[in-house]
Image: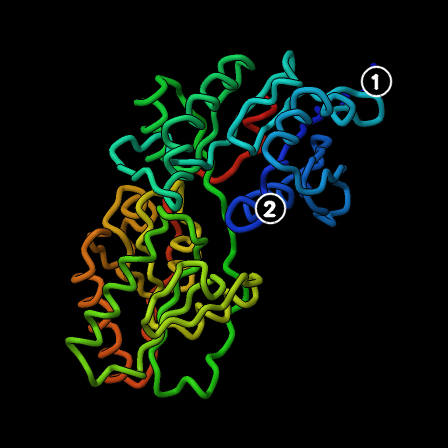
Amino acid sequence: MPPAAKPHIVFVATAARQSGAWRIVTELARLAQADPSAAYTFITTRPLHLAGIRNPVTGELGLWRRLLFECFGIRGLLRTDGRPADVLVSLNNLGILGARGIRQYVYIHQSLPFYPELKWRLDRRELGPLFYQKLYGYFMWISIKLTSARVIVQTRTMAARVRRRWRLASLCWFPHCAAGEARAARPDWADTVAFFYPATAHPHKNHAVLGRALALLEARRPDLRGRVRVLFTLGPGELGCMATPIEYLGSCTREEVAACYARSAALLFPSLVETVGLPLVEASALGLPIICADAEYAREILRGYPGATYADPRDPAPWAQAMIAAADAVLRDAGLRRHPPHRPAIPATDLNDLKA
């Protein structure tokens, strides 16, 4: 008898462009590249440049063009060497309606629909999270029902939220994403203390509490003025006017992010809600002290990590106090503190789950 054909598994990532979503895509593609027991196709917005992976590239698509493509244009890409896809994994939070009849999984990395307790205002800046919380979650649920898809989430916290909200069980896959090679701090930073917050400008990332905390820090400790700086991976003006010692780095490569971890006294992470919070994973793997939101996602990722300090994400006072304590420790010891590396105790990604 001829050997059985390898299963053909297709990942659809036509919404991922940058930030954490693209990191997940590249990590899954590297795992697929190392798996000889299946044939893999990744449909992405930009090239992956990985040998052995079939990789049709759509370019960046707006929301409506993407939905039309996934309903009508995708069928021609779901074959390799004349074979149709056996399994499809959507990395877009939505079931792929144009692939009905193919076994599907939907990888959820949009958390807002599962946090109804968060309140957003009807103003221009908060219309985005309001849409994702109130409307997008409904589209997600409908598409999953129509395609009979199974759900994949990144943490047990999200699995519990999906079960509570939708009464659906989930596979739990934790993405192992290395932080990159650490580099030495710049010598001109010898007399300053840097804090790092790698995040987009979305309102739920909660940069505002850090602006208020920095104002408190300078009021309470005038001696730290000019000696504390906070690094944001944003461009000037993305947050409006924030008159505090903030350095706007703009979009950073993985190497630049690794350099910022290496020269920082602590990671700041006040985000109100996350599916996993990749900077928490990266920073704890490098042993950085972390000042983070006292939220269930952070408690899960950092459970057992001695370098974590939790603070109310709505109150700037504990953030100011934690930053003062971290700055004093660095200046007193004339060096950065580091802890033993940490890895969250969550099941790792297993592509064999897709072949069962």
Residue found at x 74% / y 40%: 57
Q: Quadrant of residue 232?
A: bottom left
Residue 326 in the image: state x and y as whole percent: 25, 72
Q: Quadrant of residue 136?
A: top left
**Horizontal placement of 232 versus 306: left or right?**
right
Q: Quadrant of residue 8?
A: top right
Residue found at x 56% / y 33%: 91
Circle nearer the N terminus (2, 1): 1
Kindly state the secondary structure of the residue where label 2 is placed.
Answer: loop
Q: Amino acid at mark 2?
A: Arg
Residue found at x 79% / y 21%: 83
**Is residue 346 something one can see in this rendering?**
no
**Horizontal placement of 244 versus 172: left or right?**
left
**Horizontal placement of 97 versus 346: left or right?**
right
Which residue is label 2 attached to? Answer: 17
Circle 2 packing at 10 Å, graded few (<14), some (14-19), many (20+), is: some
Gap between marks 2 and 1 measured at Cα = 41 Å
Kindly state the secondary structure of the residue where label 1 is placed.
Answer: loop
Residue 325 in the image: state x and y as whole percent: 20, 72
Residue 180 in the image: state x and y as whole percent: 54, 62
In this view of the protein, which residue sits in the foreground, 329 or 213? Answer: 213
- Which numbered circle lies on residue 2? 1
Q: Amino acid at mark 1?
A: Pro
Residue mark closest to the camera, 2 vs 1: 2
Q: Quadrant of the N terminus?
A: top right
248 w.r.t. 33: above or below:
below
3 w.r.t. 219: above or below:
above
Residue 265 in the image: state x and y as whole percent: 34, 72
197 w.r.t. 91: above or below:
below
**Is residue 115 something one can see in this rendering?**
yes
